[in-house]
Image: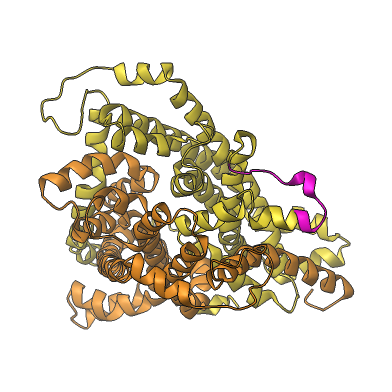
Chain colours: A orange, B yellow
Amino acid sequence: MNRYRPRTLVLELVMAAAALVVAFPVYILVNLAVRSPSDTSSPIRPTTSPTLDNFSQAWKQGALGGALANSLLVTSVSVVVVLAVSSLAAYPLARITARWSRATYLLIMLGLVLPFQLASLPLYHTMRDLQLLGSPWALILFHCGLQVPFTVFLYTGFLRAMPRDFEDAARIDGCTPLQGFRHVVLPMLKPITVTALVLNTVAVWNDFFTPLLYLSGSAQQTMPVAIAGFVGQYVTDWNLIFAALVISIVPVLAIYLALQRSIINGFAGGLRG
Amino acid sequence: MIAPTDQPGKPVVPAPGPAPVPAPVRRSQTASTWWFLLPAMLLFVFVVLVPSARGVYYAFTDWDGLDPDLSFVGLDNFTDLTRDEDAVQAIWHTLLIALAITVIQNLIGLLLALGVNSAIKSRNLLRVFLFAPAVITQIVTAYLWRNLLGPDGAVNSLLGGVGLDSWQQNWLGDPDTALWSVVGVTVWQYSGYSMVIFLAGLQSVPAEIHEAAAIDGAGPVRRFWSVTRPLLTPALTINLMLSSIGGLKLFDQVYALTGGGPGHATDTLSTLIYKDAFTLGEFGYSIALAVVLTLVVAVVSTGQYFMLARTEKAAS
């Protein structure tokens, strides 16, 4: 069924058209980001004398450097913690068949359905009482807890589909459970870890609602909130806004392109598990 | 390419289900790993479970977010809600947006998956490219489209350029098109995500079955319906769950595209929750809206779960 026929060529063209629908907004984004504000021609016309001024101006006026540093801090710490605690938790959930283990798993899965809006308002006041509002650590704490259900779901499904022979062998060789997990199980979890890493990075990096709440009114901002503030400030200065948008998506896009093969494979693994 | 060999060890037993009774020695040794759960549980309980439970409780009080002295008001917040036209409208918008996103995004996602699962030369490149919008910050996508859909934006310029001037309009400023613009932008961003999940399902369909069906004289449509479709159910389950729950919770896109406007034409439960709590200070009322959202999500997801579990059973 994998031969290239005339019909395949037609399909190839149809798919290219679909790709154009995705590409068109991105083209406009870049096209306007490199255009000087004095150029008022139609947005779909290619910019004749491209300039990088918008980028340096957006960077300075939007204080994007500080926001970028905050986003990097919040994302990297949250994701590392979430991956560590979730892979560890998935092990007994996948391997112990006792009733309490299944009940705990279902309780954690409840977190997939609960909308974060419900928890975030009471938690907002807890964070205020702990004087953590306005601090990136409130965000880190929030994301660590919020991402646990989905990450545990990924790891547990993967572990259940994995034979336990190696762990048993390690145990017979005298490894403690923790040593066995660290040296035998964890290396075998690598494919799902890459998927979980990317999906969590994307979720935490892109989150807007939580930092909007927990960091509002403070000088500490993450990238999405800084962008929203920037748009509010430069309402119609779209060339500048578009330059800021481009700056903000470069880091996640870079991670995606670097790891794209594993991500798309990881989806297949998660589905099979 | 997704090769099955990427997996370290395929399951010998297909379903996780209740495992065959393990040897007593082995079980006692695995049982000693229960404490591996502690760090994750601590975070989950502190961040998700306890605040959610408190939220449900506050919905029955006059909580204002500041005063620690609460008084119990029973169902007052909820009866206020049924009398509040904006809230009732927001519930409808939420359901409509979620339904539209779920149907359109999965339909496009499935067609794209069938496209990139064929013999076309660009399939690997397309896969990476079509998924890419899903990793972009939602708020960035929304601001980009706010410009594109503006009166002088690229969409209207494009329509003018191909002679469809009569189709030009103020997409986000007109209540009739604003809601559909929110749906369209979300579908634009996440169809590639659905595609990748469907693709994983399609690749679990063995090529031999297709060839056998083709030899037996089944055309492409018949082959899709009788061979591929039943085996696609797990992917469909995940896709429907993700898109419907995501659609019900949608906040960023609405906030950045329309802010709930024009008027209240695109307000959803999520945007009302935010506005009531943080611009009006009505925390008790806002949390009652959050409880309604939770109920809607719970009903929709359990309903879908049981319906799909039945189809899955029927298919196997």
Residue at image point 78% right, 65% down: A14
Residue B46 relative to residue A270: left or right: left
Residue B223 relative to residue B85: left or right: right
Is B167 colored magenta in this rendering? Answer: yes
Q: Outermost residue, front direction?
A: A38
How many numbered badges does the structure rendering display?
Answer: 0
Q: Which quarter of the rendering shows the N terminus of chain B?
A: bottom right
Instruction: Classify residue B118 by image quadrant.
Output: bottom right
Q: Outermost residue, bottom direction?
A: A173
Residue A232 relative to residue B168: left or right: left
Residue at image point 33% right, 57% down: A147
**Rendering coords of residue B304 (x, y %):** 53, 40
Placement of A100 over or under B38, stated as above or below = above
Residue B281 relative to residue B90: left or right: left
Residue B309 appears in the picture as rendered: yes
- Majority SS type along the magenta span: loop
The one nearer the camera, B170 or A97, is B170
Residue B9 appears in the picture as rendered: no
**Rendering coords of residue B94 (x, y %):** 50, 36
Placement of B149 over or under B296, stated as above or below = below
**Rendering coords of residue B202 (x, y %):** 65, 64
Placement of B251 over or under A85, stated as above or below = above
The one nearer the camera, B224 or B22, is B224
Placement of A235 over or under B4, stated as above or below = above
Residue numbers of the magenta segment: B160-172
**Rendering coords of residue B171 (x, y %):** 63, 44
Residue at image point 28% right, 57% down: A143
Is A62 colored magenta in this rendering? Answer: no
